[in-house]
Image (cartoon, helix red, strand yellow):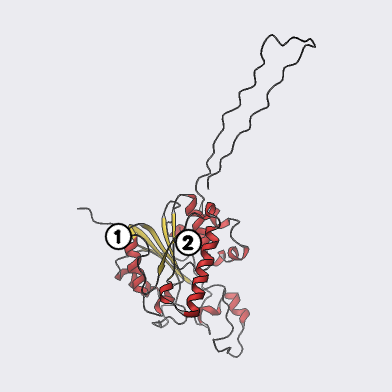
Amino acid sequence: MKSIWMASASALLLAACSGGTEAPTEPVEADTPPAAEAVETGPLSLADSVAGDWRSDDEKARDTWRNPAETLAFFEIEPSDTVVEIWPGGGWYTNVLAPYLASGDGQLIAAVWDVNVFEGDRLARIEQRIADFKAVYEADADLFGTIEYSAFSAESGALAEAGSADAVLTFRNVHNWMGNDYTAKFFTDAYAALKPGGIVGVVEHRLPSSAEQDPRAASGYVHEDFVKAMAAAAGFELVEGSEVNANPADTADHPFGVWTLPPVSATTDREGNSPEGFDAEAYAAIGESDRMTLKFVKPLETVE
């Protein structure tokens, strides 16, 4: 991601002839060209990566709700870091993280879905999605770097080499893991992958503390206290939370859960039913969900 700009040399000067046939008595010397000057642009800033023209207009339209530069800065992500992104999906955050890390000789590890836990048509769909994801980033390694891959599931192995990662990030995934009761495994696996002092960053749809938590999080919303408890049980310390992804307009009590809101904007349940008087425009006006943004740290090892 570093650009080299070369200064051009001037043309050779020609000697003027006297009109005779004899050569000039003194040689004519060319100007010495200036030395080439190398200018290194250095790593991208988070703002540069967010503004990059490799991100689509549709992706950028969601920055208002997802605040990628501010969120990654809160998680203390540096361009030289090794970062594990859990379940990157279609690559919305990958399109910010990969160029940013590649520009600073960092490393992105994409922990994709674990193909070992699927079968039949669902396995075929998952394999195709992973193949499509890889094809995008392998097509432009100069921009995105060389992404490494692991997997995460209730049965998966290590997210990364033990003690090698600076950060493990998850965006709106905890509710999925609650459905099959392996949230605790995520924090245990993240703890193993991180260096001492490494960060776990969690963004998740936030259930108001006054609302009852469904253990399976069928609505997609999760209590902050649940996430904090899971992290603490794995050995993490809470550093702080941020309201950068908060949305006070979201009441978290919608007929189709969080999927009633953009970007899914569901209008019916799985059986095709919609409540009487359902107003899709009212939910679109709310915007994306209210989200917790929590930063945890793996404690530094005690020096004896």
Residue behind mark 1: 299
Q: Position of residue 187 (x, y in %)?
A: 35, 69
For badge 1, the amino acid type reads: Pro
**Which quarter of the picture shows residue 30?**
top right
Residue occupying the point 54% across, 36% down:
38
The residue carrying pointer 2 sits among few (fewer than 14), some (14 to 19) or many (20 or more) residues within 10 Å by Cα, namely many
Left or right, 187 with respect to 147, comes to left
Q: Is residue 33 above or below residue 200?
A: above
Q: Position of residue 117 (x, y in %)?
A: 41, 76
Q: Position of residue 155 (x, y in %)?
A: 36, 74
Residue behind mark 2: 71
Q: Is residue 124 above or below residue 148?
A: below
Residue occupying the point 61% across, 66% down:
58
SS for callout 2: helix
Q: Position of residue 69 (x, y in %)?
A: 51, 58
Left or right, 246 with respect to 234, comes to right
Which residue of the protein is positioned furthest toward the left in this rendering? 304
Q: Is 202 in front, or is 43?
A: 43
Disc 2 from disc 1: Cα separation? 22 Å
Task: Name the mark on residue 150.
Answer: none
**Is there any visible trace of residue 222 in the rendered image?**
no
